[in-house]
Amino acid sequence: MRDGPDTRRRILDAAAAEFAAYGIAGARVDRISANAKANKARLYAYFGNKDGLFDQVFGELAQTIMNAVPFTPEDLPGYAASLFDTCLDSPDIVRLSTWARLERVQAGEFAVELRADTEKKVRSIAEAQANNLVNPRLDPHDVLTMIMAMALAWSPASLSYTATRSDPAEDTARRRRALIEMVGNAVSA
């Protein structure tokens, strides 16, 4: 194929938008292939089926999150703020994760793709606890989960308010400061 990698990329980009908008069940291969300007045969050749395509899109999402947000257990408020910023810049990340949680893994561990990264973060938090940098009375898994929940408080999965980059800058700055303070207070030793 003369444009195989380009076609594959167009399909993945169109699929990410489709899955974010409609979920796994609501996504349509016809729309994905039309938006990617690729025929369905190419889509099936590359990804097997719609579920395989979602798995690829979600795998890329997992890598994006791991690479975009640096994790330092000595600065968990900074980690939360970086995650907040990433969600503002890429709201489809949260939408895709929400659809995956709703339609695939409704209870228990969520992203097996992130297991190694999660365990590394949990070990880092435990080390920070041993060094009295993080409250040692809290389970490290719970610390990570709560920090992520706080960082996603204004995301597209929010039950109260979804923030966007088009919100007034002072609102974004206020939320970011509040998040940093809340995480700092929650995890301080």
Image (cartoon, rainbow, N blue to C red):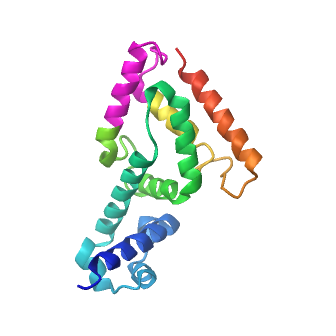
Q: What residue is at 31 percent from the left and 66 percent from the top?
A: 51
Residue 177, quarter of the rendered image: top right
Q: Residue furthest front?
A: 2
Q: Is residue 50 visible to us here? A: yes
As drawn, 61 above or below 149 = below
Residue 29: horizontal and vertical position, in percent? Answer: 38, 78
Chain part drawn in magenta: 118-142
Q: What residue is at 42 percent from the left and 78 percent from the top?
A: 32
Is residue 139 rendered magenta in the image?
A: yes
Q: Is residue 156 visible to us here? A: no
Say left or right for 98 vs 41: right
As drawn, 32 above or below 129 = below
Marker count (numbered): 0
- Magenta: main secondary structure: helix
Q: What residue is at 68 percent from the left and 33 percent from the top?
A: 178
- Specify the quadrant that holds the N terminus: bottom left
* Residue nearer the viewer, 66 or 56: 66
Residue 124: horizontal and vertical position, in percent? Answer: 37, 26
Is residue 10 rendered magenta in the image?
A: no
